[in-house]
Image: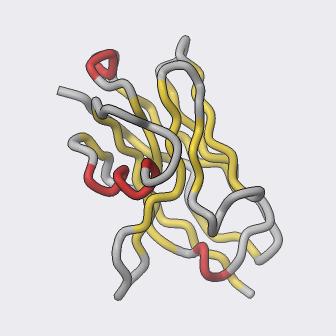
Amino acid sequence: QVQLVESGGGSVQAGGSQRLSCAASSSTYKSNCMGWFRQAPGHEREGVATIDFEGRTGYADSVKGRFTISQDNSKNTLYLQMNSLKPEDSAMYYCAADRVPFCYGPGAVEVVTEFTYRGQGTQVTVSS
């Protein structure tokens, strides 16, 4: 069983930065792809970013150029560095993991919302 625990959420002003972390259990070796998705009240889940075991990444168009996903395999930790934050980035952010046939490229980021393993989420609120 893969266990994922997010941290790093909070309140920030527009234009600011925030880094989310996701501590993963050692059993993530069963997954070849990890990522982040978010959900705001009244909105559907939105895939944000993915990263595979070789460090190849994918991003939603809405965050490309502002967010960076990375991982530290020695610490079993996934990160999401968020810069130039906008009020529309406000949402609950979830870390997720799964074994999938592709983890980056067209359509890959959208799939992260359906990953089998996910954390409890961490709230990010961006004020204008």
Question: Outermost residue, top direction?
Answer: 74
Residue at left 52%, top 44%? 105
Quadrant of the frame with the N terminus: top left
Q: Position of residue 38 (x, y in %)?
A: 44, 64
Is residue 110 shown left or right of residue 27? right
Q: Residue at x 35, y 88 (%)?
A: 42
Q: Is residue 116 left or right of residue 110?
A: left
Residue 94 picture location, percent across and down: 40, 54
Percent position (x, y) of residue 106? 50, 51
Q: Residue furthest front?
A: 106
Along the viewing direction, whichever of 52 and 75 lies nearer the viewer: 52
Q: Position of residue 14 (x, y in %)?
A: 77, 77
Asked which quadrant contains residue 4, the reply is: top left
Against 16, residue 99 (above or below) is: above
Camera-side residue: 92 or 31? 31
Q: Quadrant of residue 5?
A: top left
Q: Residue at x 64, y 70 (%)?
A: 11
Q: Quadrant of the C terminus?
A: bottom right
Taking the spot 30% from the left edge, 34% from the top edge, the residue there is 100
